[in-house]
Amino acid sequence: MAEIDNSNFNSIIRQIIKKSLFTEKQIKIILNRKSLSEFEFGISKGAYFRQVGQSRDKLMGLYYSIILLRGLGILLPDDIDVISRLAEQVSVIKDSDVFPEREEQVTNLIDKLVRQACGM
């Protein structure tokens, strides 16, 4: 997993990616396709576009899942609020230097809040 070690993401973002439905490469592809970042990929054009399709399918699945869970009352407005606030904090953290001793505290807090919002 040398790619993760050479990542452009800080360790907090990498921890969140590990717990998400996406791989780091898929996140990079989505960022490239949405013109939010530029990453180089050392893979063939065919492999790249196969990954683009997989990333698009996962992203669409995520959106449909949110619609379904919200529509069925499983994902409540308060849950959306918690997710939005966490996303805002991650947006600040993604470009910040966080002291290594604070990284675990931040990831533990995010994990705690996600587990509370999940409530299962």
Image: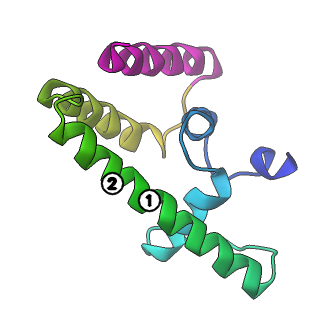
Q: Which colour scheme is used?
A: rainbow
Q: Residue furthest right?
A: 2
Which residue is at 61% across, 32% downward?
15
The residue at which mark 1 appears reads as 59
Evaluate if marks 1 and 2 touch, with contact meaning CB atoms under 8 Å apart.
Answer: yes
The residue at which mark 2 appears reads as 63
Q: In which quarter of the image is the N terminus?
A: top right
From the viewer's perspective, tell me whether residue 75 is left or right of residue 34: left
Gap between marks 1 and 2 measured at Cα: 6 Å
Residue 2 location in percent, x, y?
A: 86, 48
Q: What residue type is labelled 2?
A: Tyr
Q: Circle 1: is it few (<14), some (14-19), or many (20+) Cα within 10 Å?
A: some
Q: Nearer the viewer, residue 78 or 67?
A: 67
The residue stretch that appears in magenta: 99-120
Which residue is at 44% across, 59% downward?
59
Q: In which quarter of the image is the C terminus?
A: top left
The kind of secondary structure element at disc 2 is helix
Residue 89 location in percent, x, y?
A: 34, 34
Q: Does the magenta stretch include residue 106?
A: yes
Q: Does the magenta stretch include residue 79?
A: no
Residue 86 location in percent, x, y?
A: 32, 31
Q: Nearer the viewer, residue 12 or 50?
A: 50
The kind of secondary structure element at disc 1 is helix
Which residue is at 62% across, 14% downward?
101
- Give the vertical position of 95 relative to 11 (above or below): below
Residue 65 location in percent, x, y?
A: 34, 46
- Give the vertical position of 106 relative to 57 (above or below): above
